[in-house]
Image (cartoon, helix red, strand yellow):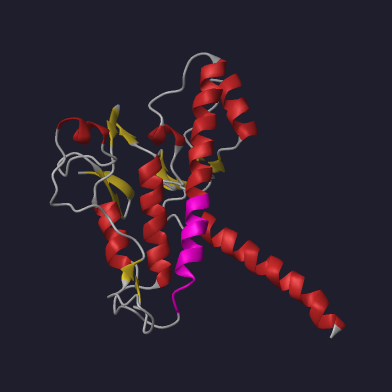
Amino acid sequence: MLYSRLLAPWLLWLVLMLTITAVRNNSTEQCLGLSETRGNSSERYQCFGLSTSLAKEICANRHRDWSNVSLPTCGRLLHKTLPSLPQDQTSCLSALDRLIRLDAEAYAHSINFRSILDRFDCPQPYSVKFTCSACQVAYQHWICSDRFSYWHKGRRYKPCRSYCRRVEQTCPFFLPLDKGPAHYAGEPTFLCLDPNIEETGDQQDQSSYGPETCCYEQCDAGRCVV
């Protein structure tokens, strides 16, 4: 009995650490361009997660190569998230601190979504194509796209709506209640705005998404402009 009581906190800690590690590593693009061509050979290079201490180092030493610095949760490379670093050190630190904060928010939202998903009986199949793990990955891609734009060849792109639709398609529905006055047909884990309602004027300018002909999408290489 004493052994069980001592073991229980250790098991809880282990489960928590595994959950955090899974969420941190769920991005398929932890380092966009993890394999890049240098000279005549293709080499793998190490990516560094952006932190407060690394931000200070980057802003203090502008000659440092920061092309291999990425956001810890979302895996976005710094040079694809910012067009350039501000010249003065205070503005530089402010810009990087903002990215760190947004990345931390994405991590917190991913954890919260996982707690909602845990209410669903994930071992039971709900789709012939998708699983709860795929749902979690799709959600993390969406929450990161909602937080960060993508810079390509000096131009800023917003995410495509397909990020949102992919979460809708991938994630399960909660089953309806079988008793009580509240009978309903089930609730989606995640719901996007109706794509048939067109955004115009200020709505389009303030939208989180870009037009279908000018946005970025998740692809095998990481993110691609369409």
Q: Image check: 216 left or right of 113?
A: left
3 and 119: which is toward the camera? 119
- In percent of width and height, residue 224 lies at 27, 45
Q: Residue at x 71, y 73 (%)?
A: 11
Relative to 72, 168 lies left or right: left
Between 177 and 222, the one nearer to me in the picture: 177
Q: Nearer the viewer, residue 181 or 68?
A: 181
The quarter of the image holding the C terminus is top left
- Which residue ends up furthest to the top in the rendered image? 88
Residue drawn where x is 47% and y is 72% of the image: 119
User: Residue 77: which quarter of the image?
Assistant: top left
**Foreground residue among 65 and 115:** 115
- Check if residue 121 falls in the magenta segment: yes
In this picture, residue 213 sits left or right of residue 41: left
- The magenta-colored residue range is 108-122
Question: Which of the image's four quarters has the N terminus?
Answer: bottom right
Q: Height in image: 54 above or below 118?
A: above
Query: x, y (%) of residue 10?
Result: 75, 70
Residue displayed at 75% across by 75% down: 8
Furthest toward the right, the residue is: 2
- Rendered position, 190 above or below 94: below
Work out whether residue 71 can be spotted. Answer: no
Quarter-wise, where is residue 186 in the image?
bottom left
State whether residue 139 is above or below residue 98. below
Residue 211 visible, this angle:
yes
Q: Compared with residue 134, is residue 183 higher up or lower down, i.e. above or below?
A: below
Q: Main secondary structure of the magenta part?
A: helix
